[in-house]
Amino acid sequence: MPASFEALFGPMSPAAFVLAVVTMLAAGFLRGFVGFGASMLIVMVLSLVLGPVAAVPIANLVGVPATLQLLPSAFREGDRSFILPFFVTSLIAAPIGTLVLITLDAALMNIAIALFVLAMLALLYRGWKLPTTVNPGIMVSFGLGAGFVQGAGGVGGPPAVVVALARPGTAQSQRGNVIGAVSALSLASLFPFWYHGLFTRDVLLLSLLFIPLYSGTTWVGARYFAGKGGKHYRNAAMLALAVIGVVTLGVAIRDYLAG
């Protein structure tokens, strides 16, 4: 590898860097349109070349500008009684999950996450819905669980999305809840990642390079939702959950067997 390339892009080959660029473009559009799934996609791809301890904080950092970009619509269209408990409980649980990230087998964690998401998706497909008024204790439990998963694997979004989609409401309100919950998870992970030294030079450099790509396609995805995409939102969100869950499960099982 040329020294100049390594100086610019860290421990990535040119081919791996191109793959990462394509991933960031796709992840940004996914974030802007359905409001989630971007971190899981980024972590799956970058873990192959950088390992999860680098991939997870990169996925978190590149999403911060997009989070700030989407938050106004989330609070305008979503349900604050759903979003705020997720934010508070995520702040509590994310640091505990980060301890798991740096000490335990990431493959086992991702297997458990993928199985949970697929099981909940099956319930959604069969028409399961939460009542309009939900016991606060249930919401707190889901927030703690999603925050823990976010800290451990950077993929707390799908469990939160399952709950958001199970709540009654329009596509706009469901997307607002999804974006609010995922944004809360993203912001909750910043301090524990920094505290444990995961924001290394390579992580910061690659994140700065990827942010414009990710943020640009996030804007495109949001514009698509505001135009023709809104009527397809629920089906697109469930399809994204299914694909992410199946791929994550397959990759995690492969990594566990290889380890």
Image: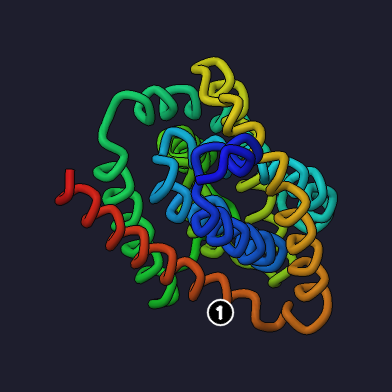
Locate residue 258 relative to residue 235 in the image: left or right: left
Q: Position of residue 29 (x, y in %)?
A: 68, 66
Q: Position of residue 145 (x, y in %)?
A: 42, 38
> Which residue is pictured at 33% across the width and 48% down the height?
110
Q: Position of residue 109 (x, y in %)?
A: 30, 42
Decide which of 183, 165 is in the foreground and name it: 183
> Which residue is pictured at 17% across the width and 43% down the height?
259
Task: Report the label total.
Answer: 1
Q: Is residue 161 visible?
A: no
Residue at the outermost top position: 195
> Which residue is pictured at 24% across the width and 43% down the height?
108
Q: Position of residue 172 (x, y in %)?
A: 74, 67
Decide which of 251, 178 is in the foreground and name it: 251
Q: Which of the 4 quarters of the picture holds residue 136?
A: top right
Q: Which of the 4 quarters of the picture holds residue 148?
A: top left
Q: Amino acid at mark 1?
A: Asn
Decide which of 169, 241 is in the foreground and name it: 241
Locate residue 29 relative to residue 140 in the image: left or right: right
Q: Please say which color scheme the image uses.
A: rainbow
Q: Is residue 179 visible?
A: yes
Look at mark 1 in the image and give the residue it sits on: 235
User: Is 23 placed above or below 100 here?
Assistant: below
User: Is 30 placed above or below 78 here?
Assistant: below
